[in-house]
Amino acid sequence: MPFVSLGLTPSLCNPLAKLGYTTPTPVQLKSIPIVLTGKDLLARAQTGTGKTAAFGLPMIQRLQIVGGAPAGTRKPRALVLVPTRELALQVHKSLTTYGVPANMRVTAIFGGVSIVPQKRDLQRGVDIIVATPGRLLDHMEQRTVDLSGIEILTLDEADRMLDMGFLPPLRRILKVLPRERQTLLFSATISQDVVRLSADFTRDPQRVDVSEGQIMAQTVTHRVHPVSDQRKGDLLTHILQQKPTGQALVFCKTKHGSNRVGQYLERAGVKAAVIHGNKSQGARTKALSDFKAGHVSVLVATDIAARGLDIPQLPLVVNFDLPLVAEDYIHRAGRTGRAGVAGRAVSLVSPDDRGLMQSIQRLLPTPVEHVVIEGFPVTASSHEALPEAGRRHQGGRNNRGSSGPRSGARQGSGGPGRRPAARSGRFGARP
């Protein structure tokens, strides 16, 4: 079914072929006709399913300005709120591309960069604002943005915004928006908190759920490797050096841990870049650009920094640390297996991770494959880190469990839980 059959004008559909969009994805197929009617929408779809086009294309059509307006006279008519800087950049890029036939002006507003160019863009006049809540509030307080003309509000990745504590800023923003508007809410998961948010922000929304009971793309395979905390660094390097691996996104739970993993991989001869909240926006942008360009093969990130990353055909996601919230596993694994391309999600699970892994397993439709890697001793407790699943050894021989702690301390004392001697060259050692 072509995009034009959904009610989109041919002028908006023409650029899509150049982007490789030939057939609407399920979320686009169901959402675009609803958005075009002007009704509110609550949509559930996992990452990588084409959500930006699902709300962006019909939004632009509804806002379409024939010939445009004189510079400086345009008042923002659409607002897209996103949780992170990276997602703001990604959505801005997509909407700018979609909006060319309609002469749409799109600007991105987010923190970590100078506010001056953003003020300049707003003064010149824009049609669509893509913003993170915090920086938008800065503009509101400085009276450099006028939201009185907003006709369409979109909340993208609403569940993540709630997880990050953005509900109070969202309510402050909502108070200044016109009551007569269309509101679109997209979320990978529909928790009770998201339902309550929808009740406050929308009016009798139409509901779209393309997950069909599955909150994870079926193109992603899931695997767990049991390992002690002390050997995680060694096992991560082993996995990344297997052929063919291609590029990989590695998740850590803390900023400090991300730095240590990145340094460890560099010492092991793996080209890696690190992004997290303490990095400047310039450093984060460069790291992502180097990764996309293939200058580095591994990107190490925290959940917040990696949210919304647009990395086409990423083959591998590795959970060095399991997320503390089970739903975050869905967001992490959703970075791979996008647009129908196969992907792998691998987790390094220690005995202490048993409870977290059980919570994650409950979100997935099938048991996660449980594979012991030869040379990485596991104890009985780590072997039981998962509920019943396919368990096997990789490497052809039985695991040498008896060498456990002593072997781990000697070979992998650089794990996240222990500081090795500087001469070891292992995880956490000096350069």
Image (cartoon, helix red, strand yellow):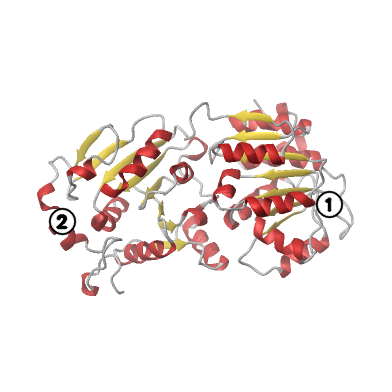
Q: Quadrant of residue 280?
A: bottom right
Q: Is residue 22 visible?
A: no
The answer, for residue 214, to whether it is visible in the render is: yes
Q: Residue at x 26, y 47 (%)?
A: 351
* Residue type, mark 1 in image: Ser
Q: Nearer the viewer, residue 359 or 102?
A: 359
The foreground one among 341 and 203 is 203
- Label 1 – label 2 distance at C-alpha: 63 Å
**Placement of 317 over or under 142, stated as above or below:** above
Proximity of marks 1 and 2: CB atoms separated by less than 8 Å: no
Which sits in the foreground, 107 or 199? 199
| Callout 2 secondary element | helix
Q: Could you tell me how many numbered marks the image carries?
A: 2
Q: Which residue is mark 1?
A: 148
Q: Position of residue 319 (x, y in %)?
A: 37, 49
Q: Residue furthest left?
A: 402
Task: Give the percent coordinates (x, y) of residue 112.
Answer: 60, 66
Inspect the image, locate mark 2, and give the three-letter code of the amino acid beneath it: Pro
